Amino acid sequence: PEAGDFDAKQPFPAAASVKLTRRNGTGAVVARMDPKNNYRGWDLWVEGDKPGFHLISSFPGDALKVVGNNPLPVNQWAHVAVVYDGSGKAAGVTVYVNGAPQPTATHVDVLKSTTRTTVPFTVGTRYGTERLPGSLVEDIRLYDRALTAREVARLATSAAAAETLAKPAAQRTPPETAAVFDWWLGGFDKPTAELGVRI
């Protein structure tokens, strides 16, 4: 019941791997939002294929809305994350795709009040509405603190590495093998970590 129970002054991230199977998709990837109560809550959102974030007490007069400028690809997995710093400002929201911070547009920046809601956490939809059509979602992550850019990048590469490692070795391409090696080297090789090398 406590999953995603965040409020306006609490830093938090939300992340997931998303695969859109059609263009012009709009809907929630993950959410804890009550559309029947002036949309109170938050969501990791896709709007016209572009990833974004809402944090709402009452929409649009007491809310944040930030949307990335670039659309997600279709028919391939993308790791999407938003990190909110607890400031109550749109400037405190960073949108990431495949571990890289994205340019964004601020649509609403007037948050003043609590955003906490009693409706449950949902996947692929808001509570009872606004399903993201033609989408697949996996590897959902929520944390009770903001993540650094490096931590978000590690999440993104971990998702890609897991997908590659699920394939038989003979079916992995040379770039996939190299990417998995870099992932392992940067996160698990002790001598590399001791040297402070960033992969």
Image (cartoon, helix red, strand yellow):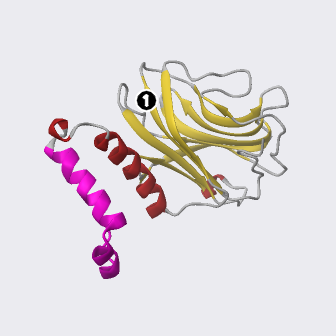
Residue closer to the observer: 41 or 17: 17
Image height of 123 relative to 66, above or below? above
Image position of 78 (left or right of 139): left
Give me the residue at 82% from left, 31% from top.
38
x, y percent for residue 80: 48, 42
Question: Which quadrant of the figure has residue 73?
Answer: top left
Magenta stretch, overall SS: helix
Q: Secondary structure at mark 1?
A: strand
Image height of 60 relative to 35, above or below? below
Which residue sits furthest bottom?
195
Residue closer to the observer: 123 or 52: 123
Q: Is residue 29 magenta?
A: no
Residue closer to the observer: 19 or 27: 19
Image position of 170 (left or right of 189): left
Give me the residue at 25% from left, 52% from top.
179
Locate the C terminus by quadrant.
bottom left
x, y percent for residue 149: 47, 61
- Give amino acid for label 1: Lys
Res 70 seen here: yes
Image position of 13 (left or right of 178): right
Image position of 36 (left or right of 16): right
Question: How packed is label 1: few (under 14 Cα within 10 Å), some, or many (20 or more)?
Answer: some
Give me the residue at 41% from left, 52% from top.
99
**Magenta residues?**
174-199
Q: Which residue is mark 1?
A: 19
Locate the N terminus by quadrant.
top right
Res 199 seen here: no
Question: Which quadrant of the figure has residue 188?
Answer: bottom left
Residue closer to the observer: 59 or 81: 81
x, y percent for residue 87: 70, 61
